[in-house]
Image (cartoon, helix red, strand yellow):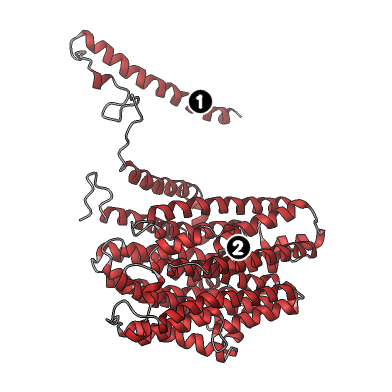
């Protein structure tokens, strides 16, 4: 029982660490202003919510760059790939005992199938930001 | 997965590999011919492995239920493999010149057709509701992109229209599946059939789910209340895509409808209900399709309405359920014959269209004087669609109508006959234009040898299967025996 609860102890330590790191970073950065290492020169771009991203609010409906759509689609491909690899990776021990190396090569086949459309997008120039078909 | 299962699904695997291989060749070799030959190579392999299953040469088991009864590669499925793979191969061969002429997205057209073919191959052998749904989506999503691939005047419109209508119809289909699952508690067709026979459920929910499933597949089969996308798609999509869709998509939808209705939902209450619904839908499709086709001036739109009418005739085969398999037999025969005649008409028109770049019927005027061979081929195809005696179209209609009479639906056969006469008007009108009207131009259309070979295969199929129906009847009979 105690061993069981001890597993949660690890989680607590992890959570504390996760809270401490960003607070510590902000704290060091704040302290650094006092010794003139980090001069504070705010401007409009720096203070925006996503620096170098799209402006989060605009006066009228914001125009998107259409090309985000290709990236969204490619992202979905890899996202689904990851989702399907996880259960395989977790159960790999059991699978390899039952099927041997086939368990591994089955996943390679799947990875190959997922990679082919990526190759297609790459060769057709859909990954380049400035679109040029020829 | 056992060794045997792998041998049984080889046709599907080869078509799946053909998609990947075609993509890789398309992006590496900058040569359209290589792309085309790669896809054809794997399609021929798929055809050979289907032959292996049909004749039980190697490693083929008699037990046909694979992967936990989600897929069955029985002879019924293999019959449809032959049909849709042949359609794809002919589409690819004939559309080579057309694709060489268009500058962009020609490899993509092949790839998307192959993807859709993969979905259709799974669909015709699926025996489980979720597999059916996934396969249906795989077969229809590439078709949406294919409809809009040319970026012409109508492409955005048909892409959007087809996308919205197809998703709505799939949603309705899923709704029907959900009700069926709720009543029976299983997604396996075998289990559903057993459960329905034992408990004899007679709830409105069952009838509702039947209507929803018919609505979902009616969209794919081009039946009347769900037909509005057909003429637009036929007019706007590239002709090879339309040729592929008109036969392969329809055939696969009919295959799965036979599996779901004739085999699964065959308890007395649901049979009585869906026979009524199918007869009504069939009458509507035949009549509305034929009557609207009468006034068309655009050849592709006319073929679109004609395909709606043809779907109505085919549906008689399913409505004639009590004829002991005769109806389904006639339906399979009709589908194969329809494949031959419709593809011949489409492919000849593809060539004519490439000269005029516009699809009015008047472009066919006086074709027989300029290019007599093409005219003979297209006239044969049209006669077969109409149902003239020495052609395969007549035999198909004969089998379907006689099955209707056998199962006591004489009124349906009579309406079918009347509609055939109505349809004769617009088919014969085109033939009259081809033979008697004055041509706009006097130059003949160049045809290369490959095209003559494919047209001749179509024409030989139309005539031989019309004269010697036993050739095909043996195949359809053993397909149905494996099913029942």
* Image mark 2: chain: B
* Image mark 1: chain: A
Q: Position of residue B450 (x, y in %)?
A: 33, 83
Q: Nearer the viewer, residue B55 or B378?
A: B378
Q: Which residue is mark 1?
A: A9
Residue at 55% x, 62% y is B220
Q: Nearer the viewer, residue B6 or B55?
A: B55
Q: Which residue is mark 2?
A: B70
What secondary structure is marked by label 2? Answer: loop
- The reply to whether residue B65 is visible in this rendering is no
The quadrant in which the N terminus of chain A is found is top right
What secondary structure is marked by label 1? Answer: helix
Horizontally, residue A57 falls left or right of residue B128, namely left
> Whole-Å distance between the Cαs marked 1 and 2?
46 Å
Q: Position of residue B108 (x, y in %)?
A: 34, 62
Q: Position of residue A90 (x, y in %)?
A: 49, 47
Q: Nearer the viewer, residue B118 or B232?
A: B232
Quarter of the image where one finds residue A41: top left
Q: Position of residue B157 (x, y in %)?
A: 42, 53
Badge 1 and badge 2 both on one subunit = no
């Amino acid at each position: 029982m105690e061993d069981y609860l001890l597993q949660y102890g690890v989680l607590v330590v992890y959570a504390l660490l996760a809270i401490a790191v960003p607070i510590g970073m902000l704290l060091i950065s704040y302290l650094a202003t006092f010794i003139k290492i980090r001069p504070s020169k705010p401007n409009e771009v720096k203070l925006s919510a996503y620096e170098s991203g799209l402006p989060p609010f605009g006066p009228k409906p914001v125009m998107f760059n259409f090309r985000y759509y290709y990236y969204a689609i490619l992202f979905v491909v890899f996202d689904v790939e990851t989702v399907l690899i996880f259960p395989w990776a977790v159960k790999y021990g059991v699978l390899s005992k039952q099927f041997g190396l086939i368990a591994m090569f089955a996943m390679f086949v799947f990875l190959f199938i997922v990679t082919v459309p990526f190759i297609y997008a790459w060769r057709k120039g859909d990954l380049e930001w400035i679109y040029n078909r020829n | 997965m056992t060794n045997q299962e792998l041998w049984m699904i080889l046709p599907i695997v080869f078509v799946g590999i053909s998609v990947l291989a075609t993509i890789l060749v398309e992006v590496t070799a900058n040569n359209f011919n290589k792309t085309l030959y790669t896809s054809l190579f794997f399609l021929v392999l798929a055809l050979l492995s289907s032959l292996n299953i049909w004749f039980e040469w190697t490693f083929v088991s008699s037990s046909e239920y694979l992967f936990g009864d989600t897929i069955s590669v029985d002879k019924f499925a293999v019959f449809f493999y032959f049909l849709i793979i042949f359609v794809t191969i002919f589409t690819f061969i004939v559309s080579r010149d057309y694709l060489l002429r268009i500058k962009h997205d020609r490899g993509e057209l092949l790839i998307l057709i192959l993807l859709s073919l993969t979905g259709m191959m799974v669909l015709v052998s699926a025996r489980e509701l979720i597999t059916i749904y996934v396969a249906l989506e795989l077969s229809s999503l590439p078709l949406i992109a294919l409809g809009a691939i040319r970026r012409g005047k109508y492409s955005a419109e048909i892409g959007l229209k087809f996308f919205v209508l197809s998703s709505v119809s799939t949603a309705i289909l899923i709704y029907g599946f959900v009700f069926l699952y709720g009543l029976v508690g299983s997604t396996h067709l075998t289990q559903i059939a057993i459960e329905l026979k034992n408990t004899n459920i007679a709830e409105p929910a069952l009838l509702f789910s039947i209507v929803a499933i018919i609505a979902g597949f009616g969209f794919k089969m081009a039946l009347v209340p769900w037909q509005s996308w057909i003429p637009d798609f036929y007019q706007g999509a590239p002709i090879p895509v339309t040729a592929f869709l008109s036969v392969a998509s329809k055939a696969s939808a009919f295959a799965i409808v036979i599996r779901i209705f004739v085999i699964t939902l065959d308890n007395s209450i649901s049979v009585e209900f869906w026979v009524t619904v199918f007869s009504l839908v069939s009458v509507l499709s035949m009549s509305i399709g034929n009557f609207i086709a009468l006034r068309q001036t655009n050849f592709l739109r006319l073929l679109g309405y004609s395909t709606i009418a043809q779907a109505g005739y085919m549906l008689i085969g399913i409505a004639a359920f009590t004829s002991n398999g005769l109806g389904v037999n006639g339906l399979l025969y009709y589908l194969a014959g329809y494949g031959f005649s419709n593809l011949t008409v489409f492919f000849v028109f593809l060539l004519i269209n490439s000269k005029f770049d516009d699809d009015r019927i008047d472009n066919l005027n006086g074709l027989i004087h300029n290019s007599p061979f093409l005219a003979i081929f297209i006239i044969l195809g049209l006669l077969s669609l109409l149902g003239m005696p020495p052609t395969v179209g007549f035999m198909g209609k004969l089998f379907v109508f006689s099955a209707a009479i056998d199962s006591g639906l004489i009124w349906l056969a009579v309406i079918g006959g009347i509609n055939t006469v109505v349809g004769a008007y617009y088919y014969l009108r085109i033939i009259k234009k081809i033979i008697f009207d004055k041509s706009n131009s006097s130059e003949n259309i160049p045809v290369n040898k490959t095209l003559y070979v494919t047209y001749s295969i179509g024409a030989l199929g139309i005539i031989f299967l019309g004269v010697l129906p036993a050739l095909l009847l043996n195949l359809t009979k053993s397909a149905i025996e494996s099913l029942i």
